[in-house]
Amino acid sequence: MRHFTSVNDVTDIQQLVALARELKKNPLQNSELGKNKTLGLIYFNPSLRTRLSTQKAAHNLGLRVMDMNVGSDSWTLEIRDDVVMDGAASEHIKEAAAVIGQYCDIIGIRSFPSLNDKETDYKEEVIQKFIKYSGVPVISLESATLHPLQSLADMMTIEELKTKKRPKVVLTWAAHPKALPQAVPNSFAEWMNKAEVDFVITHPEGYELDEKFTKGATITHNQDEALAGADFVYAKNWSSYTNYGNIICKDKTWMITEEKMALTNNAKFMHCLPIRRNVIASDAVLDGPNAVVIQEAGNRVWSAQAVLKTILETQF
Amino acid sequence: MRHFTSVNDVTDIQQLVALARELKKNPLQNSELGKNKTLGLIYFNPSLRTRLSTQKAAHNLGLRVMDMNVGSDSWTLEIRDDVVMDGAASEHIKEAAAVIGQYCDIIGIRSFPSLNDKETDYKEEVIQKFIKYSGVPVISLESATLHPLQSLADMMTIEELKTKKRPKVVLTWAAHPKALPQAVPNSFAEWMNKAEVDFVITHPEGYELDEKFTKGATITHNQDEALAGADFVYAKNWSSYTNYGNIICKDKTWMITEEKMALTNNAKFMHCLPIRRNVIASDAVLDGPNAVVIQEAGNRVWSAQAVLKTILETQF
Amino acid sequence: MRHFTSVNDVTDIQQLVALARELKKNPLQNSELGKNKTLGLIYFNPSLRTRLSTQKAAHNLGLRVMDMNVGSDSWTLEIRDDVVMDGAASEHIKEAAAVIGQYCDIIGIRSFPSLNDKETDYKEEVIQKFIKYSGVPVISLESATLHPLQSLADMMTIEELKTKKRPKVVLTWAAHPKALPQAVPNSFAEWMNKAEVDFVITHPEGYELDEKFTKGATITHNQDEALAGADFVYAKNWSSYTNYGNIICKDKTWMITEEKMALTNNAKFMHCLPIRRNVIASDAVLDGPNAVVIQEAGNRVWSAQAVLKTILETQF
């Protein structure tokens, strides 16, 4: 594995999940592997879980970590090519990526979409230009359209908790006051479509995700029908992909409540976090025994550590 | 010691001070104690001394450190329970604390009061919820109402410098252009009330602190009388506790000057810093031979290291 | 070497360049030298290269690093003496420097000029007060008027790439939409004036730099004449020194293009970065084979490491 930006960078998904679970049991088994190597974590956007879990994973592997918030710690970057840079941006991503590649052996990039311009967002310019210009392995810490470290942790969590060979996993939209990226649902879909699960996506009309990621899943606008018999319920808001970046439904009945969970097969409740309580899911669901969001967040360490270990072993 | 949020968490104060002084002489005597453990330092507010001294203490013990500024590095947090989270906050402290507890073995929290709502501030919701939901030991890096790492360093400084068995220690209010928390004076009072000192607090009328912390101290509105014969003068502004969070006195004559210090028994001048020069104390006092504020700030390392060492030895 | 704020702190420049080149070949040869010592990196302004390269250099020497952004991580500082501090600043640089000196063995300071008050800027109050009050070695991470870690990396880059004993090095101004400091050209000039090069500075009228730094260089307003036969072209904008801090020329024909580079002796193109593309230099120049800006930025690690190593060996 050279880079980690999508499920398509992974040769053997089951093996990667197994590695993550193995590292969870024995976190320090490779504590010298990253010795004298440096991981740069570059944030264009806020981060809690990713920031802390990736650092922790790096420490477990003996890597040094340097992090930087773009625009506050450093300069505002220009992403577009062929521009006369007489505006706000002081530096071009071409130079920034190449320079950071001089100092770091592996680079992690967090960069959210604009939600204004679908074509640009879905070209994944920021992470792709870091790959092109840095000269070193690049890991997505959530890009404009995908969040693979989250999806790997999600798949690991399902593996840990499933009680049948082929569980039913339901990704359900819920309303939210702000327009959010499609990265988490896109990514979860492309991982679930490669997993041994029955995968169902449910959302209001107009919230269809890019087929590139969802193809193969069962998609329905009837949330109750989707939830029936579910073993895992994964709730998440996203803004419209077709009516790009807009909020076209504010229907609060999509919120996951105990009544909704009662339709399932005693399903575990999952969410990538941060989650707005009593907006995406009720307090009762989040505080109930079937919520596994903290375990899921904890697994972000082993997800990141499995990816970093694989890159360290194959690229150096 | 499980948590460190107040003097009441300490079994034997004299022993903790002695430990801090011992660590100052030999900082690296436990340099492997924290090996492969992670201290998370979470800041809701700015910090200079606490940020750097706690990191340094952690390094001396072999701990890894991860720090995070809430709201800029990460998401804005909701603190209240039973809220429909459709406002500015993206994440609830319940999840944030529990998640950070997944990544860190010990958590330090800095969180100032609102100064708007006395009841909420004095419930210490932020640090108490971190204790409740994180599942790991929690250290106060200054909470809404207390600053015990500062008080421990203060007590250590007095131990180092006292020339008699039972010195007179005076905490004096001074005017300040902004409304400040009561955390430092509350905390200093509750530590001094357990120390072998004659402890006097002086402030204008209306600046009475919560009796919970001050009970046992001599309290006077006559600053000159308080300063007479003092061995240590600890200056600090705070906003009113009774008229909560307000500035009700702007009397500049409370500033500590050479004339005021001349009333004392050649007292040492202490302050937790940051201090506004020529507002809280004059340049002449701060630049004079009796100012010990830098030694006091330096002792923050040993204060933090004594607390971290104690937690590492008793909790793991 | 006690401090590193200018070329004048260096006993033997050639030897320091040679050390940087030697460290580049063998980065980990002194990986225990800084053990249990702490480098504090204090930023009054944004930084990308300096932030990451200095950290990396410190890691290579086994130093622990603590960094802090003044004003966001910590408090706003008062720099002036004899002030009644009833304004925005919560802490005086006297206390901040002395306190940081309690926690760090070496301090790096980045502090840009105001560009409003020449006299104050050129007194270098921030870094000089850190030297005066911290009690430990201080390294400039770019001060109001100089950027010696950059200049050392620049000189090292010229040494690596020169094909003749005495190359012609041209520092050329170019127009820029914002008023920028004179620190990089001042510093480059004072280092080049001590190097075995033919050093030429070219800029529009009114952009004369302080003679203290440029004395000895050939200075011309004719850019084409300056570029003729150049082996190295170092482009950089700066605001006027005589008409202090102002932009007095917006002439875009000073931008370095392929046509301009054709006047040279197949010169290497240098810049300290960040650079505005198609403002300071064209895409064609920056993407062409003679641009060495990334190598130059990479050399910042060895520049910082040579300085840190020298201080560690001579001051402890």
Image (tube, coloured by chain):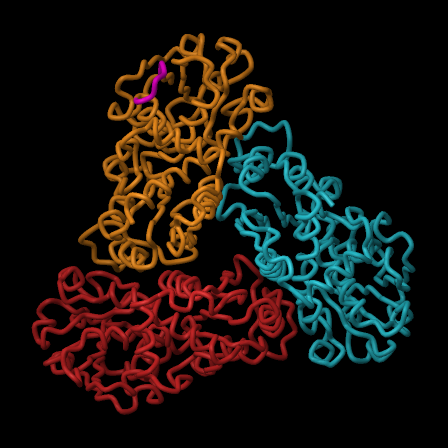
Chain colours: A cyan, B red, C orange
Q: Nearer the viewer, residue C44 or C191?
A: C191
- At a point 21% along the width and 81% down the height, the residue shown is B202
Residue C194: image location, x then y, percent: 30, 22
Residue A246: image location, x then y, percent: 74, 53
Q: Is residue B158 left or right of residue A243?
A: left
Q: Is residue C203 above or below residue C13?
A: above
Residue B216: image location, x then y, percent: 27, 91
Q: How many marks?
A: 0
Judged by its main secondary structure, the magenta piece is loop
Q: Is residue C130 above or below residue A252?
A: above
Within the image, what quadrant is residue B59 found in?
Answer: bottom left
Within the image, what quadrant is residue B219 found in?
Answer: bottom left
Q: Quadrant of the N terminus of chain C?
A: top left
Q: Which residues are magenta?
A: C194-199
- At a point 28% along the width and 25% down the height, the residue shown is C213
Residue A270 in sight here: yes
Q: Is residue A184 above or below residue C244?
A: below
> Magenta includes C195?
yes
Q: Nearer the viewer, residue B238 or B268?
A: B268
Q: Is residue A102 left or right of residue A201?
A: left
Q: Is residue A33 above or below residue C11?
A: below
Q: Is residue A316 left or right of residue A227?
A: left
- At a point 31% along the width and 68% down the height, the residue shown is B24
Q: Nearer the viewer, residue C60 or A204?
A: C60
Residue A176 in sight here: no
Q: Nearer the viewer, residue B309 or C23?
A: C23
Residue B71: image location, x then y, percent: 53, 61
- At a point 15% along the width and 64% down the height, the residue shown is B285
> Magenta includes C27?
no
